[in-house]
Amino acid sequence: MNRTTRLALAVGLGLAFVVWQANQDPGRLFAVVLALVAVGYAFAPVLRDGIAD
């Protein structure tokens, strides 16, 4: 599996998690989105460098 496929899979799983949480309890959606954004910012340099290779 190449990097692009892994990145697309990771983004898809993240979006699926957000949708699932929103269906469970709409009040949690904001907290889940904030958590995913924080993780995204933490891993942004890793993803950027992985794509740049």
Image (cartoon, rainbow, N blue to C red):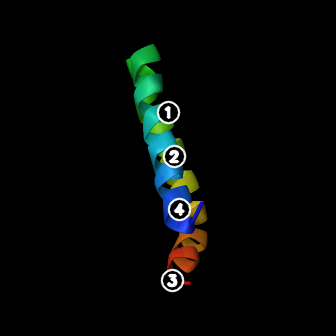
Q: Residue at x 43, y 40 (%)?
A: 15
Residue named by callout 3 = 52
Report the side of 26 relative to 21 (left or right): left
Query: Who is closer to the viewer here, 15 or 4?
Result: 4
| Dot 1 amino acid type | Phe
Cα distance between the residues tagged 2 and 3: 23 Å
Residue named by callout 2 = 36
Residue named by callout 4 = 41
SS class, disc 3: helix
Looking at the image, residue 10 lies above or below residue 51: above
The C terminus, quarter of image? bottom right
Whether the residues at callouts 3 and 1 have beta carbons within 8 Å, the answer is no
Please tell me which of labels 2 and 4 falls first in the chain.
2
Residue 36: horizontal and vertical position, in percent?
51, 46
Q: Which mark is residue 42?
A: none
| Dot 3 amino acid type | Ala
Cα distance between the residues tagged 2 and 1: 10 Å
Query: Who is closer to the viewer here, 32 or 18?
Result: 18
Q: Residues within 10 Å of mark 2 (few under 14, many from 20)?
A: some
Residue named by callout 1 = 17
Residue 16, quarter of the rendered image: top left
SS class, disc 4: helix
Please tell me which of labels 2 and 1 falls first in the chain.
1
SS class, disc 1: helix
Q: Would residue 3 be seen by someone viewing this image from the given angle?
A: yes
Whether the residues at callouts 2 and 1 have beta carbons within 8 Å, the answer is yes
Residue 40: horizontal and vertical position, in percent?
52, 57
Cα distance between the residues tagged 2 and 4: 9 Å
Residue 19, quarter of the rendered image: top left
